[in-house]
Image (cartoon, rainbow, N blue to C red):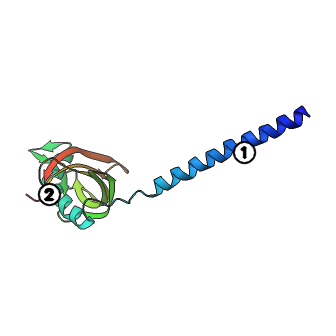
Amino acid sequence: MKQKLLLLLFCLFSLTVLGADKEDVTSENTEVMSAPARRPMYSEEFYQEMLEAFCMKHFNEKFAFFKVFNVGAVKYWETSLRAESAAYRDTNTDLVRGKLSFSYLWGLMKCKDGEFTAIVKKGTEPNEFIVLFLRCGGFIPKNVRSTDEVSFIYPE
């Protein structure tokens, strides 16, 4: 008799505990689902124009790993940049991906449609962006080079 009573009490206790856990889980799920979706700060077209201006100003200098007679080994091809996607990364940062072309080894080698990734943050000044530009391509496949973070005013 004692065993049956203990078994009955154990079953009632476990059902009470399981029921309380289920209530907590459902209330947590409804809070998570109400978060709004985030969009990039600017459109792909804006980033294409801005990053084109950035590359015209900084690409050759930042990727010139070696200079001869003050001429760098890397040269960006004007208007070759294509921003293919822009995505929200966090409140002040977007991630832009696309393709661009450049020559290196003083024009002896070419990289057509090499991939790039740009991490773009809003700066503290009006029209200021902090750009970390990573390009892939060149002599070594999957070779990634970076500009580090560069402050850039656009439009000037």
- The quadrant of the image that shows the N terminus is top right
Query: In terms of depth relative to the viewer, which is nearer, 37 or 2?
Result: 2
- The answer to whether 88 appears left or right of 4 in the picture is left
Q: Which of marks 1 and 2 is nearer the N terminus?
A: 1
Q: Give the residue type that dot 2 points to.
A: Met
Does 1 sit above or below residue 126? above
Q: Where is residue 71 in the image (x, y as percent from the top left)?
A: 11, 48
For the residues labelled 1 and 2, the Cα–Cα distance comes to 68 Å
Residue 17, above or below 87: above
Can residue 118 be seen by looking at this rendering? no
Q: Is mark 1 on a helix, strand or loop?
A: helix
Give whichever of 104, 128 is nearer the camera. Answer: 128
> Residue 56 — which label?
2
User: On residue 15, which mark appears?
Assistant: 1
Which class describes the residues within 10 Å of circle 1: few (<14), some (14-19), or many (20+)?
Answer: few
Which sits in the foreground, 10 or 32? 10
Q: In which quarter of the image is residue 115?
A: bottom left
Q: Where is residue 72 in the image (x, y as percent from the top left)?
A: 15, 48
* The C terminus lies in quadrant: bottom left
Nearest to the observer: residue 12 or residue 53? 12
